[in-house]
Amino acid sequence: MLNMINKIIKETGLGQKKIVLVGNPNVGKSVFFHQLTGQYVDVSNYPGTTIEFCCSKLGDAFLMDTPGVYGLSSNTPEESLVRDTVLTADIVINVVDAVHLDRDFFLTCQLADMGIPMIVVLNMVDELLARGLKLNLVELKQRLGVPVVPMVATKGKGIDLLKRRLHQARPGRVSDVVDGLLLNYPGLRRGDALLILEGDPEVAARCNLAPGGEKGIIFADRRRRANEIASAVLREKTADTAFATRLGHWLIRPITGIPALLLVLWLFYELVGVFFAQIVVGYTEGLMQGCYEPWVRSLFANVIDLQSLVGVMLTGQFGLLTMAITYVLGLLFPLVLGFYLVLAVLEDSGYMPRIAILMDRLMSFLGLNGQAVIPMVLGFGCVTMALITTRLLTTERERRIATLLLALAVPCSAQLAFVTAILGSLGLGYMLLYGLIIFSLMTGVGTVLNRFMTGGSVPLLLDLPPMRFPRLDNVLRKSWTRTFSFIKEAFPVFLGGAFLLSLLSITGLMNKIEQIMEPLTISWLYLPNETASAFIMGFIRRDFGTARIMGIPMDPLQTFVALVTLTMFVPCIASTMVIFKERGWREGTAIWLLISVLAFMGGGLLSRLLSFAYGLYPAITLPLTALIILAILFVIVTISRWRRTLG
Amino acid sequence: MMLDKVKRGDLIKIVSIGEAGVRENALRMGIDEGSILVCAEVIPAGPIVLRKHRQEVAIGRSLMCNIAVELLARAGEARPACINLTGEMC
C-alpha cells in the first residue's frame, strides 16, 4: 500500500495537483473519468467494477479514479487505499447519484468534515424526472458550501462546466459535533484527526495514537445531516412510475423472476452456444481452414520444403502459422466476443444484483451469499477476470470458496467454445450431462467446503442499482476492449503452445511422456495415451488442451470423460497467476494441487461410472449416469447438511 | 417484531440493528435506527428488499432475525395502526 502511495507521489511530482474522484459504488465515476480524460475504464451497472485505481493527466493536474465506497474507514483493503488516496489529495471530486442523495451524502459529509477542497458532481440528473423527483440546486450548494455541478456523464453533459468550476473547489461545511471533538487532537492534520476520532486503527497507528471511540456519535450525526440535506433539496412530485422500477421488481419476484431468469439463460445459450459457437464459428473456421491455411502453405511451399523441420514447425499439424492462428482467430475470437457481448448487456442492465437476490438462498448452501453469483457468472466468460472480482466478496472465507469453485468447476468461454463444438457433434444428451456434472461439482464441492471451513456464510446486505437500458456504445466498447486484451494475452500462449507441441512431437519426447502417463491415461481414465498431450497443454491453457482433444480419435464416451477431466483440470496460467497473487503462494499451491488430484479422481470415477452404466443398459447410459450422479450429490449434500445441524 | 415477519408493502420503522458491523454498513448505505422504510419485496425463504425514497437495499434472511422493526402500517392500510401492533415478539 505504501509503495503505491509513494509511486503516486513520485508520478505526480512536486508541483502537480492531485485530483481524486470519490463516490459511492455505481454512481458513474468511471464514465465520468472516461469523459474527462478520454481514457476508457471498464464500466458496468453493478458495484465494484473499478477494482484497480486508474490515473490520468488532466491539464497540469493528475486525476485518479477510485473504487466506490460508502465511507472512508478501513473495513476492506480497497477502502483503506481509497482513504489514503483521499488523505493525500489536493482536490476531491465527489460524484453523487442525483436519485440517491441521502445515501451518497454520508460520504460527502465525511469528505467535508475532513476539510479537503472539494466539488460535488451531481450525476444522472436526467433520471430525476422519470423517478418523480425535483431538486433545488441553489439550496444544495448553500447547504454543502461547495460548488455543485449537475451532470449526465454518459452523454458528456456538464463536463465543460466542471472544468470551469474546478478552481473553485473548497472545503465543505463542517458538522458542529465534529468541530467540537476535533479540539482533542490539536496539531494533527484535520483528515487524520477525524479518522482517528472515528476509530480508524491504521491511521491511529501511523500517528502513534490510540484509536478514538467517537464513531457512534459522529456516524449518527453524519447520517442525520445527510438525511436532512437530502430531504431539504429533494421533493417528491409524483410517484415513481419509471418502467425500470417496476421491471426491477418483476425480476426479483420469484413467480416472474424465475421464468425471466430461465428465459435469459436460454437466450444466452441460443446466442452464444448456437449462434456464435455454431453458425459464426462454422463460418470463420471454414474460412481459416479452407482459405487461409492452404494460402499459407502454398506461400511457404515456394520458399522452404514443407516436410523439413522448419516447414513442419510453421505449417504442420501443430504449425505456428496454421493451427495456432486458426484456433485463435477462427475459434476463440468470435466465441469470446460473443460471451463478452452477452455479459456486457447483463452487467450494464443492472440484472446481475437481481440474480444475486434470487439466488441468495441457494448460494448459502455453498457457504456463499447471493453476491457470489456475479463472479460465478463472469467465470463463464473468463475465469481470470472472475477471480479478480472475487474481491467484491466481503470475507476471506467466501473469497476462498469462490476461488476454488471457479478454478475447479467453471469452464471459461474459450474452453466452453471447444466444449460446445465437440459436444454439439456428440448430441444433446452429452451436453445436458456435461451441464449436470458442472452443477453437481459446484454444489457438491461447495457444500463440503461450507461444512468443513470454520464460520458461516456472510448475510447479504446489498444496495440494488436501478435497472437501466444498456448503452450500445458502452456494451460494444467494453466487449471489444475485453476481447482484444484476451486475444492479445492468449495469442502468444497459443503460439508458444503450438511450438512446444511441434517440438515434443518432432523430437519424440511426446511419445516418452505419453508412455510415462499411461498408468494415468489408459489404466485409470480409460483414455488413449495421446490424451497426455492434451493434459500437458491444459497446464498452459485449458482451452488449448480441449482443442487438442478434437484431434484425437476416441469413442464418444471417452471424448466425454476427457472433456470433463479437462474442465476440472487446473485453470490456465493467467488464472493460476491471479490465484497465487490473490491467495498467496502457499494457499495457491494447495488449491492447485487439490484441483489436479480432484480432476483426475473425478475423471476416473466418471469413466468407471459410464462403463458401469453402459454395461447395465447400453441404450440409456447417459440418463443412468445422470441419475447416479444426482444420487451421489444428494447423499453428499444430505450428509454435509445433517452434520451441520448436529454440530 | 423482527424483520422476518414483515410482508410486501408494509411500512416499517427500524428499531434496532443487532450486529455492530451490519449496523455501520447499513448506516452508510442510508438505513439506520429510526429510518422509515417500505418493504418492496420479500423473496420466500430468501432476502427482503427494503425501499427508502428511491433507493432499494436487499437484506439476507439470516440478518432478518437481528433487526427489530416497528410496523407502522400493513400493506394497503391507509393510516398507521401501530399502537396495538408494537411489542410483538419475533
Image (tube, grey):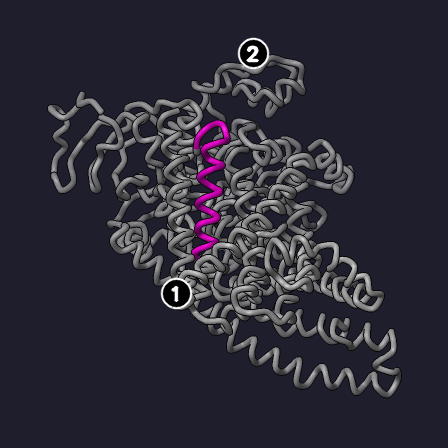
Front position in the image: A157 or A360: A360
Do circles 1 and 2 both sit on a common chain? yes
Decide which of tag 1 and tag 2 comes sooner along the chain. Answer: 2
Q: Left or right of A63: which side holds B12?
A: left
Front position in the image: A345 or A122: A345
Q: CA distance from mark 1 to mark 2?
A: 78 Å
Do callouts 1 and 2 mark residues in contact (Cβ within 8 Å)? no
Majority secondary structure of magenta residues: helix
Instruction: Give the residue pinned by disc 2.
Output: A184
Q: Please state, as top left, top right, bottom left or bottom right, where the N terminus of chain A lies in the image.
A: top right
Q: Please state, as top left, top right, bottom left or bottom right, where the C terminus of chain A lies in the image.
A: top left
Q: Position of residue A575 (x, y in %)?
A: 64, 50
* Relative height, residue A33 to residue A268 (above, below): above
Q: Specify the subunit that label 1 lies on.
A: A
Front position in the image: A15 or B69: B69
**Amino acid marked by disc 1:** Ile
What residue span does the magenta drawing correspond to? A436-456
**Magenta region includes residue A101:** no
Circle 2 crowding by C-alpha within 10 Å: few under 14, some 14–19, many from 20 = few
- Front position among marks 1 and 2: 1
> In which image quadrant can residue B46 be found?
top left
Q: Which mark is residue A271?
A: none
